[in-house]
Image (tube, rainbow, N blue to C red):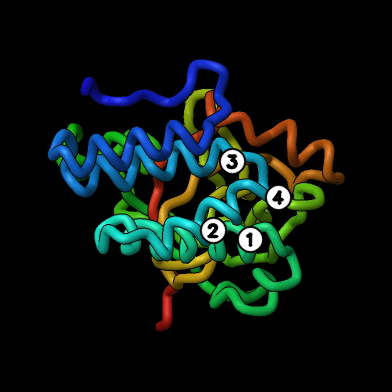
Amino acid sequence: MRPLRAPANGMATNDDIDRLIAAWEAGIFTFTEFQDKLMTLVWALPAAEKRAAMEVLTAHANEDVRQAALELQVFARHEALSRNFDYVRQNSPLRPGARLELFAGYDYHSTEGKPWWLDGHECYRATFLGFASLGENTIPAGLVEFDQTIELPGHKGRFAVLRTSYDSHSFAWGEPDGVVSVHVREALPPDLASIRSSLDLTLATETHASYRVDER
């Protein structure tokens, strides 16, 4: 049996999942590969079928399949919590006034620890201003004000909109450190439409920055 790919039409079926499990049991994939492919297929299902599929998988005869399904359930829970604006705002360690350090970047290793966007700085320090909703069922953005004006080719400003995501360990913004895309702006967006229009990853100042709460 050849390795499976995500359905061409983007819509998985239970048969696709059964074939993937058979391929895993035949030793075609590593467990990590199996988990990734299973997530791709399950996440392509409509919401109701996704929940039903995870319930069936958690009761599967194969222990590895059950383990993968349990991790999918955790991931699904973190996704749901991440899209709940009030939950994120109330439970995130990032609070208005919190001090942040923003550092690293996509080219951190290729530049020997001197990513382009830091412009020679070890990090940028900023004050967290709060979360901004991007609409119903979306992950909130974070708003910060830097201690200094950022001046880079095509990017200048004292403020930034930050985007992040969830993973198997936490809901989005659930940890005092993580990875964010940084969108530097001269002023805070005045409305929801302006925030959305500023968050194209191709226009981000940095797509893979790290943040951490400065406890000092």
> Which of disc 2 and disc 3 is earlier in sequence?
2
Give the class, few, some or many, for how many residues have Cα within 10 Å of label 1's Cα (few <14, many ≥20): some
Q: Nearer the viewer, residue 212 or 74?
A: 74
Q: Amino acid at mark 4?
A: Thr
Q: Residue furthest top?
A: 8
Name the residue that disc number 3 marks. Answer: 184
**Quadrant of the frame with the C terminus:** bottom left
Residue 34 in view in this figure? yes
Give the class, few, some or many, for how many residues have Cα within 10 Å of label 4's Cα (few <14, many ≥20): some
Looking at the rendered structure, which numbered label has been put on residue 80?
Answer: 1
The secondary structure type at the circle numbered 2 is: helix
Question: Horizontal placement of 114 versus 125: left or right?
Answer: left
Name the residue that disc number 2 marks. Answer: 76
* Residue visible at 58% across and 35% down in the picture: 156
Give the class, few, some or many, for how many residues have Cα within 10 Å of label 3's Cα (few <14, many ≥20): many
Name the residue that disc number 4 marks. Answer: 138
Residue 40 position (above or below residue 85): above
Q: Quadrant of residue 33 in the image? A: top left
Question: Horizontal placement of 212 versus 150: left or right?
Answer: left
